Amino acid sequence: MNWGKYLVAGMGSFMLFIISMGVYMFTQPADDYDKQYYEKGLTFDHDYVREKQVAQDKAQPVISFSDNNLIVRFTQPADGSVKFEHASNHRLDKMFSIQSNAGNVVSIPLEQLSTGQWHLRFEWASLHKNYLYEQEVYLP
């Protein structure tokens, strides 16, 4: 029995497998990873504290739609911003500043926004506390 040719055949097939996996890896499209990953990691604790503050103070805003406007009701007077992030096209992202009126209500016009899935990121200050709230909405 000659084990040499089986050993060479086994090594050859393993090398062919490794080469084919390398070719397959380089023919795949580039990964869509977050280019801001490191910066977001550095600010994670700050964002986490602001999200917990919303839960502690029960300051979650109530979101509704009325006549092509987004109506946001806050529990306290709010001053900050809301970022609309489109799910499929980041070039459509928009930022609006918010400042609630006497009734703690903010109205945001939706004419300049396209239909589809949006991620809303509210960042505001109220009574010397900072808050962060995120929600997914679908704009018709």
Image (cartoon, rainbow, N blue to C red):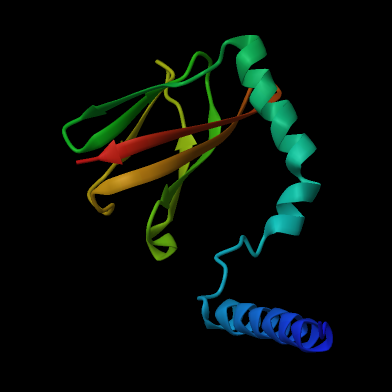
Nearest the camera: 102 or 72? 72
| Residue 127 appears in the rendering | no
Q: Position of residue 52 (x, y in %)?
A: 68, 21
Residue at coordinates 74% horizontally, 80% vertically from top-left?
10
Q: Position of residue 33 (x, y in %)?
A: 60, 62
Nearest the camera: 62 or 134? 134
Q: Residue 57, relative to residue 106: is it above or below? A: above
* In-image side of 59 versus 84 (left or right): right
Residue at coordinates 62% horizontally, 60% vertically from top-left?
34
* In-image side of 15 versus 115 (left or right): right
Q: Quadrant of residue 46?
A: top right
Q: Position of residue 104 (x, y in %)?
A: 44, 19
Q: Residue 9, relative to residue 107: is it above or below? A: below
| Residue 78 appears in the rendering | yes
Image quadrant occupied by the C terminus:
top left
Image quadrant occupied by the N terminus:
bottom right
Residue at coordinates 33% horizontally, 45% vertically from top-left?
117
